[in-house]
């Protein structure tokens, strides 16, 4: 019964456009959403409505979550759910928002087996089980700037990657052919990126992307939206498989024109 009721509620949400004032705010705080082609806008707004209704937005560190925050986060997270068969981050329950970078303690074992507590200052983190944590000052700044960094896209990309249970840089893909092409393209690009870093060449991906295939993938999602033409030119095979997966072509003329 629950599933049935939820399905019906979801269908209604998917068909509900945002009120004009909220749409204007979303375009203001998350300009990427304004660049969607007209044909995709209604679907995008429906997905935003689903995320706003189904996910819990929680303030932390004294922050009170505002409408602008919810729209900036849901608006950009919804860009990754326009594809057929999208399931709106089923494992994700909470989006926790801090006012600014937050400190997270990680245990790090050293070579002698001693465990040290490292403290990292982060602007975003995706927890495999149910939560994305974001720093609003970074979300606000990075959503408006077109500089290859976008903490919302990055952390929600990790959510999609973790949905497979692997967190290995390959999200759930619609078919085996795309999965095979995906692995080949990403493997080659990951190695090429490491080579360029080593030779101190100018790089499109940043140094953190070389850390693991999962980080490389999350960064690729940021670049796909923020620097699509550069990505298509330098890492064409990766751009092609991502375009097939997300069903978007931001480097083309019809979709997300820069
Ligand atoms: Zn990451």
Image (cartoon, rainbow, N blue to C red):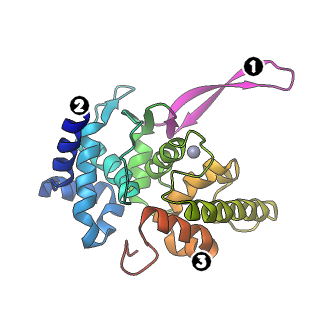
Between disc 3 and disc 2, whose residue precedes? 2
Disc 3 on helix, strand or loop?
A: helix
Residue occupying the point 48% across, 43% down = 159
Residue occupying the point 39% across, 81% down = 253
Q: Which residues are magenta?
A: 100-128
Given this view, does label 2 or label 1 mark the residue nearer the observer? 2
Q: State yes or no: discs 3 and 1 in contact (Cβ < 8 Å).
A: no
Residue 115's label in the rendered image is 1
Q: CA distance from mark 2 to mark 1?
A: 45 Å
Disc 1 on helix, strand or loop?
A: strand
Between disc 2 and disc 1, whose residue precedes? 2
Q: CA distance from mark 3 to mark 2?
A: 47 Å
Q: Which residue is mark 2?
A: 2
* Residue 148 in view: no
Given this view, does label 3 or label 2 mark the residue nearer the observer? 2
Residue occupying the point 46% across, 75% down = 251
| Position above or below: 129 against 134 | above
Q: Residues within 10 Å of mark 2 (few under 14, many from 20)?
A: few
């Amino acid at each position: 019964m629950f599933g049935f009721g939820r399905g019906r509620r979801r269908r209604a949400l998917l068909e509900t456009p945002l009120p004009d004032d909220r749409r204007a705010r979303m375009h203001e705080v998350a300009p990427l959403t304004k660049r969607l082609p007209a044909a995709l806008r209604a679907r995008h707004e429906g997905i935003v409505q689903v995320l706003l209704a189904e996910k819990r937005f929680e303030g932390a560190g004294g922050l009170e979550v505002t409408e602008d925050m919810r729209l900036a986060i849901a608006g950009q997270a919804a860009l990754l759910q326009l594809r057929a068969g999208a399931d709106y981050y089923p494992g994700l329950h909470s989006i926790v928002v801090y006012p600014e970078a937050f400190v997270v303690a990680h245990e790090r074992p050293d070579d002698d087996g001693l465990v040290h507590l490292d403290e990292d200052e982060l602007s975003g983190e995706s927890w495999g089980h149910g939560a994305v944590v974001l720093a609003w000052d970074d979300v606000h700044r990075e959503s408006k700037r077109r500089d290859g960094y976008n903490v919302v896209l990055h952390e929600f990309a990790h959510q999609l990657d973790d949905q497979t249970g692997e967190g290995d840089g390959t999200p759930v893909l619609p078919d085996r052919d795309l999965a095979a092409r995906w692995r080949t393209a990403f493997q080659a690009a990951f190695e090429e990126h490491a080579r360029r870093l080593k030779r101190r060449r100018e790089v499109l991906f940043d140094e953190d992307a070389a850390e693991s295939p999962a980080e490389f993938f999350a960064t690729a999602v940021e670049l796909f939206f923020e620097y699509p033409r550069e990505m298509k030119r330098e890492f064409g095979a990766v751009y092609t498989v991502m375009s097939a997966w997300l069903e978007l072509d931001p480097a083309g003329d019809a979709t997300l024109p820069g």
